[in-house]
Image: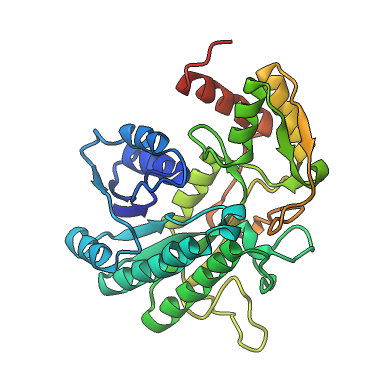
Amino acid sequence: MRVLITGSAGFIGSALAIRLLERGDEVIGVDNLNDYYDVGLKEARLSLIKGNPLFTEARVDIADRAAISALFEHHRPERVVNLAAQAGVRYSLINPHAYVDTNITGFANILESCRHNGVEHLVYASSSSVYGGNTSMPFSVHDNVDHPLSLYAASKKANELMAHTYSHLYSLPTTGLRFFTVYGPWGRPDMALFLFTQKILAGEPIDVFNFGNHRRDFTYIDDIVEGVIRTLDKPASPNPDWSGDSPDPATSNAPYRLYNIGNNQPIELMRYIDVLEECLGKKAKKNYLPLQPGDVPDTYADVDQLIHDVDYQPKTPIETGIRNFIHWYLDYYNIQR
């Protein structure tokens, strides 16, 4: 297939591009390489795929309507994976307009380009953050999610609503994936595992929010990519049993689907830190802090629907995933121990 991936220099996007290229798909990678975090890391991810003759790089901002429209018209992708987004719950408290520009305006540009260029299937990144004030565990895609706790979460919920509109009006198959705390080699420097590793090795204290009483459904990058590909290969279809009298939020009478994509096994944050300390052979100094605004105490993904529809099977324990990350981190930064 010819697949267009936005956010192709990102953590998930670059890993997905590698897998699609390995199986012989043509990939058009779209990324503006903004400086939200280390551009050098993004360039290094891209260096893994730049030499592949099936890869085409486009340094474009998805918020640039004319550029995105021209890109779609030129390449005519058959399927699209939209992973470009302004990420981060805490950053949304500081720079809210970045989330509107990329996550709302940018996503509208992607939808319009898919609509006008005959795209067979749009898969896009949503987030576990949409569950917001929900406390019923595990989080289910069949539950109502109308109480976001951050603008980032609200922007992702808006993406789901926008996608449904295009599925309904234009029969564009769309699938939203609610990612749950993705980690692993080549990960984002603003995520906990990266920050913790950096500070522990430097002998600096790590910030442990909610006094360590977090649980997260940490999901390894390889399991995420496998789930994305399985979903991409199965375009969304209407649910014949959907009823407006009792509407299921995860499906529709339009070609629209929502899935959780997580490990289905929440881990205590303190256990996560314990494993990291074991892998590093060094204890962390801990700075215990209260729950941050916009954060939720726990996440736990019900992935039954994804298992049922595409046979998704996450299989990487945190002991393996964190060890793999540490090996990569030490090698990438040339740290001798």
Judge left or right: residue 63 versus residue 289: left
Image quadrant assignment for residue 212: top right
Is the residue 162 above or below the residue 291 in the image? below
Residue 308 visible to an observer of this rendering: no
Judge left or right: residue 22 versus residue 86: left
Is the residue 30 above or below the residue 328 in the image? below
Judge left or right: residue 164 versus residue 284: left
Quarter of the C terminus within the rendering: top right
Q: Where residue 42 appears, x then y in whole percent?
A: 39, 38
At x 44% / y 68%, what residue is drawn?
174
Furthest-top residue in view? 337
Furthest-front residue in view? 94
Is the residue 277 above or below the residue 209 in the image? above
* Coloring basis for residues: rainbow
Is the residue 7 above or below the residue 113 in the image? above
Q: Where residue 269 appears, x then y in whole percent?
A: 75, 39
Image quadrant assignment for residue 190: top right
Q: Where residue 191 appears, x then y in whole percent?
A: 59, 41
Q: How many marks?
A: 0
At x 34% / y 69%, what residue is drawn?
109
Judge left or right: residue 71 versus residue 240: left
Furthest-left residue in view? 74
Using the image as rendered, state which of residue 293 and residue 84 is in the foreground.
Answer: 293
Residue 310 visible to an observer of this rendering: yes
Q: Where residue 61 appears, x then y in whole percent?
A: 32, 57
At x 69% / y 48%, what residue is drawn?
264
Furthest-bottom residue in view? 245
Using the image as rendered, state which of residue 155 and residue 257 is in the foreground.
Answer: 155
